[in-house]
Amino acid sequence: MHFIPPGVLRDRGVLDRTVRRQLVHVMTDAALAGRPAWVREGARAHFADPLQGSVPRAGCPQDAELLRPTSAGGLSDASLRARACFERQVNAGRPWRDVR
């Protein structure tokens, strides 16, 4: 795992969240290998971050929106949509390993 220096993350109040997200990646990436980026990012958000506010009903993001975002706002929007897509399938009864 590669981080901004822990002191900087701690000062910004995101150290715990950053560690949780990276641990979820380690624990889920092999099971979700070969799936679209929104599945992997949606799993990360679902398992690592408590839900804050409502989740959009928009379509699932394209890989480029998550892997090569054009802005911080665009990445944030794509991440929220990835979480929504992942959680719709899980909430409908699909096991997390089977989300596609």
Image (spheres, grey):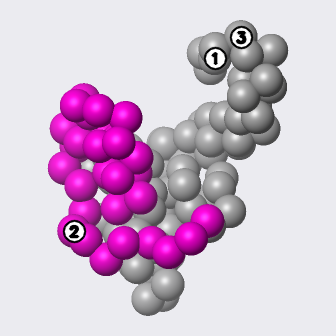
What residue is disc 3 on? Answer: 5
- Specify which label sits upstream in the sequence, 2 or 1: 1
- Name which quarter of the figure residue 65 lies in: top left
Q: Left or right: where does residue 39 sit relative to residue 18?
A: left
**Residue drawn at the location 49% of the way across and 84% of the way down:** 91
Label 2: which secondary element: loop
Secondary structure found at label 3: loop
Is the C terminus in the top left, top right, bottom left or bottom right quadrant? Answer: bottom left
- State whether residue 86 is above or below residue 6: below
Q: Residue at x 65, y 53 (%)?
A: 48
User: In terms of depth relative to the viewer, which is nearer, 87 or 57?
Assistant: 57
Binning the other alpha carbons within 10 Å of mark 3 as few (below 14), some (14 to 19) or many (20 upward) gives few
User: On the image, which quarter does residue 9 sit in?
Assistant: top right
Label 3 is placed on what type of residue?
Answer: Pro
Q: State yes or no: residue 73 in magenta.
A: yes
Q: Is residue 44 visible?
A: yes
The magenta stretch spans residue 80? yes
Q: CA distance from mark 3 to mark 1?
A: 6 Å
- Lower position in the chain sequence, tag 3 or tag 2: 3
Magenta-highlighted residues: 52-81
Please identify the quarter of the rendering in which residue 18 is found.
top right
Residue behind mark 1 = 3
Mark sitting on residue 75: none
